[in-house]
Amino acid sequence: MAVDDYEELVKYYELHETIGTGGFAKVKLATHLLTGEKVAIKIMDKDSLGDDLPRVKTEIDAMKNLSHQHVCRLYHVIETPKKIFMVLEYCPGGELFDYIIAKDRLSEDEARVFFRQIVSAVAYIHSQGYAHRDLKPENLLIDEDHNLKLIDFGLCAKPKGGLDYHLMTCCGSPAYAAPELIQGKAYIGSEADIWSMGILMYALMCGYLPFDDDNVMVLYKKIMRGKYDIPKWLSPGTVLLLSQMLQVDPKKRVSVKHLLKHPWLLQGYNCPVEWYSKCPLGYMDEDCVTELSVYSKHSKHSMSCLISEWNYDHITATYLLLQTKKNRGKPVRLVRSLAAMEPSSFKELKSRTNLDFEEGSNVEQPYVFGSMEFSDDELFYDDCSYSGIEPLPSKEYSKYRAELNSVDSAPTTPMSQRSSTKKSENKENSDTKLSINEDPFLHPGPWTPVAKKKGILTTPTHNIPSATKEKSCLNKDTPTKKPIVNNEMIPAGISPERRCRSVDIDLNQVHMDSAQKKKGTKVFGSLERGLDKVITMLTPSKRKGFARDGPRKLRAHYNVTMTNILNPDHLLNEITRVLPRKNVDYVQKGYTLKCKTQSDFGKVTMQFELEVCQLKSEIMGIRRQRLKGDAWVYKRLVEDILSSCKV
Ligand code: H91
């Protein structure tokens, strides 16, 4: 990892382990330093993106325009000469796909809870003029409240003339593709999404796909015929709804508008699906603005001007994460400790862990800066600059906050009109000194000017001699464009490589009812059926049971299969005996087997991990995680491997 590329990122986030890969991206767990909130960071390497670059641009543009309770939220976009980082809402429950297969299939009632959320998200994105075009359970994540969040907008489309205009590009996953799409006909994006939702609903309630085949041509024929099995456990109401969504003729397909109040979706609820956004774009929460202004010693008016630029920079991220905190009932406070901003070496001296964020042990600690040296560049700024914007100590803070609330009547709510399309207006209203892209939350230590290397997402458009301007490959028609400073300041002395160090948080630390530890025969669902616990993050300091030489101690999770083998080495040997027979290559790292399959041409078709772990009462388990490849093919392969093991 080139430290340089991560320099900007680690100013604001502490990076943890990789939690997944999605095609051309790697996704890491991280902690936002100022709020202590967990985020997922999608990391893309520009050189490797090649033809996928437009997809990234599409995704970023779409996500900047979407804000909905069932759409994964984009907080921050960072572009460096080599990398693009997207800081996203973290969903600890992982993919809906894994959840379905762990349970075999969902009951009608549970499927309805999820399906209402899917309809809500899709109706919302359609209302914003977008078609998703890749709806599938792998693209729906489960958040900490067990709610769904739609991800992966790389294939979405926003037809210029509106969503009723025809599209031509055939995209998405074949098994979820509508008949008109695979025939290469012009199609309406929203109608194609309804078909995919039909496939999704079938997968939720059956645990397999209605149209499936290893041979894509055979699969396409099945889709075009539109005939699928109806298992006996589906209720007549479910069968009816499926048939309305899986209509080969798109004109006969049910519309989203009808879905919102479809009798199947209303059962047990007496209200239509709420599709409107509960967190509209541009909304500004007064408490959050106040906290940000107090913290950075800006007036509330200046702060709201800065926020309302919605540049998806650190200001946007800090505001949105603070709002997330508030929505979860946590205190609307930014971390007032050195640890959030200081060089990581200092942080280690205090041996601070992530637990501090969660348990708030030093969240409220006052932080007083010692004497600071300022570089010449610092003198360039005044009231709205870096100088004197360190967080106030607690006592002063309360006083300042009270004063601010009584004198500053800057409009902070409601801001529903201040959507991204209104940005220019807001910009005009803002204090000109603030229109430069400084980060008012950063440590005002000895500052070092850093020339923006290759600003292709947020191209600096002023203050730079035109000859030296470099063009962003992503910002051609990004709605938000504002002039930003090209000599952005960063605190000197930060050691990014330290912040990048993974703390190896365990994603599989979940609780399990002992009653649920029944032994079954199915590899995925049955053993763990009923386990729908939210993942509990454990910090390194909590991981006392971690034995270096033995398998990791994990709690049961729907990604962990239990075995009746007591010896971890026997279990490991058994798996490594079976893997070559299934044409799976693997590399062993402790008790983790990093597995991959390859096509005849050497292309990696699937990547996943199998890890022998210790569950409660000496029971050995196998944690599985898909990193790359088709989810259903992975399901079959891992089922095959694990059922071939004598466990
Ligand atoms: N699939 C399509 O594996 C294969 C936990 C986890 C937690 C996440 C938040 C956001 C995203 C992924 C998360 C995640 C790709 C996210 C959002 C967008 C996006 C991408 C990822 C995988 C990649 C890793 C994902 C799940 C989907 C985990 N992931 N574990 N929070 O485009 Cl918008 Cl690629």
Image (cartoon, rainbow, N blue to C red):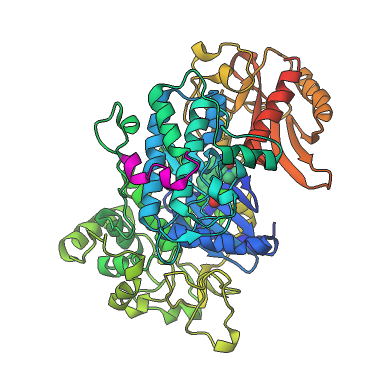
Q: Where does residue 537 sit, x and y in percent of width and height? A: 51, 35
Numbered range of the magenta stretch: 247-260
Residue 252: within the magenta?
Answer: yes
Whether residue 68 is visible to the viewer of this picture, yes or no, is no
Q: Quadrant of residue 148?
A: top left
- Toward the left, the furthest residue is 406
Residue 456: within the magenta?
Answer: no
Name the quarter where the C terminus is drawn: top right
Q: Residue at x 27, y 68 (%)?
A: 299
- Relative to 368, residue 465 above or below: below
Ligand 1's quadrant: top right
Q: For this rendering, which residue is in front, 502 or 314?
A: 314
Q: Where does residue 169 sit, x and y in percent of width and height? A: 57, 58
Q: Residue at x 49, y 18 (%)?
A: 232
Q: Is residue 583 left or right of residue 454?
A: right
Q: Residue at x 71, y 30 (%)?
A: 637
Q: Where does residue 205 sit, x and y in percent of width and height? A: 48, 27
Whether residue 543 is visible to the viewer of this picture, yes or no, is yes
Q: Quadrant of residue 619?
A: top right
Name the quarter where the N terminus is drawn: bottom right
